[in-house]
Image (tube, helix red, strand yellow):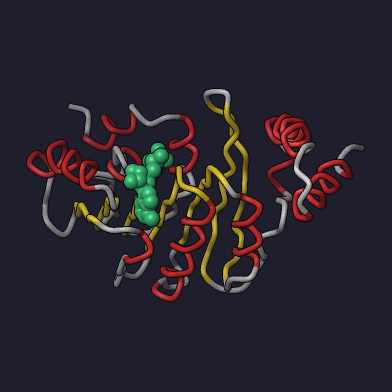
Amino acid sequence: MMSSSKRVGKRLSERLKNLRKFHQKQQHIWDIGCDHGLLGMSFYGEAGIESINLVDPSAPVIKELKINYKDSYITEGYLNIIHSEGQKLTIQKPSNTIFIAGMGGKEIGEIISHLLPQLDNSSQIIISPHRKILELRAQLKSMPLSLVTEEVIFEDEQFYQILVLKPGKGSAVSSFGQEMWRSEVGEQYRLQQLKTYEIHKDKASISYLEYLKTMVE
Ligand SMILES: C[S@@+](CC[C@H](N)C(=O)[O-])C[C@H]1O[C@@H](n2cnc3c(N)ncnc32)[C@H](O)[C@@H]1O
């Protein structure tokens, strides 16, 4: 019989699969802004996982999660469904993978600055912001965080940046991204961003455009 993590895993979008692949060996999974909870639940039953924490501030989302998962799966302490904003969350565990996907850069920045002091050095944060990415990068750059890797993916006619971060000083997050532009999808994204930002006249957008143009060899 197929395990529950494999069953849920089969329904993951390519975007969520791409986020999931960056999990290393952290024991505690946090899916913040989880909505359907598919990303967090894809770890259910996986060896080495000690808890899955599905977090969302929306009451209807929490109600639906409890209907879908709580009765059939729940072992309190192993699968936790938490009604909270990420900005108010208490972690109190070592070795965490924190996923924050599908939210704006402002919320993601706030959540990371709230959680960072609670995280040990074996934890990691995997994010995929949907808006305000330049502003978020500027904020992340000034935090005690290091960039493990970054990539851009394309799904359903949309590009998504993914950043993998660790607490502590190391290779800093850059203002506009570096490694992610080097792939084939990265080049398509660059061309799309050149068009998108053409009409923006603020200082950060102008610098971003100049940066994108310098990448043409
Ligand atoms: C577009 S869904 C993304 C779902 C999933 N993470 C994904 O990427 O497919 C955004 C979710 O974030 C939740 N959300 C909005 N603000 C939040 C916050 N401050 N903290 C945690 N979750 C939040 C919403 O309730 C919603 O369920």
Can you tell which quarter of the image residue 94 is in? bottom left
Residue 58 point in image, percent of width and height: 27, 47
Let me know if residue 158 appears in the view: yes
Please indicate whether residue 77 sits to the left or right of residue 91 in the image: left
Please say if 161 is above or below 154. Answer: below
Q: Measuring 19% from the left and 52% from the top, which residue is drawn there?
A: 79
Residue 173 point in image, percent of width and height: 66, 60
Residue 130 point in image, percent of width and height: 53, 42
Q: Quadrant of the C terminus?
A: top right
Please say if 99 is above or below 7. Answer: below
Residue 24 point in image, percent of width and height: 44, 53
Can you tell which quarter of the image residue 88 is in? bottom left
Q: Measuring 17% from the left and 27% from the top, which residue is drawn there?
A: 1
In the current view of this chain or complex, which residue is farthest to the left? 71
Please indicate whether residue 194 sits to the left or right of residue 93 in the image: right
In the current view of this chain or complex, which residue is farthest to the bottom? 117
Q: How many numbered marks, from 0 up? A: 0
Please say if 157 is above or below 126. Answer: above
Please indicate whether residue 161 sits to the left or right of residue 22 in the image: right
Q: Measuring 20% from the left and 52% from the top, which residue is drawn there?
A: 81
User: Who is closer to the viewer here, 170 or 131?
Assistant: 131
User: Who is closer to the viewer here, 28 or 131?
Assistant: 131
Let me know if residue 32 appears in the view: no
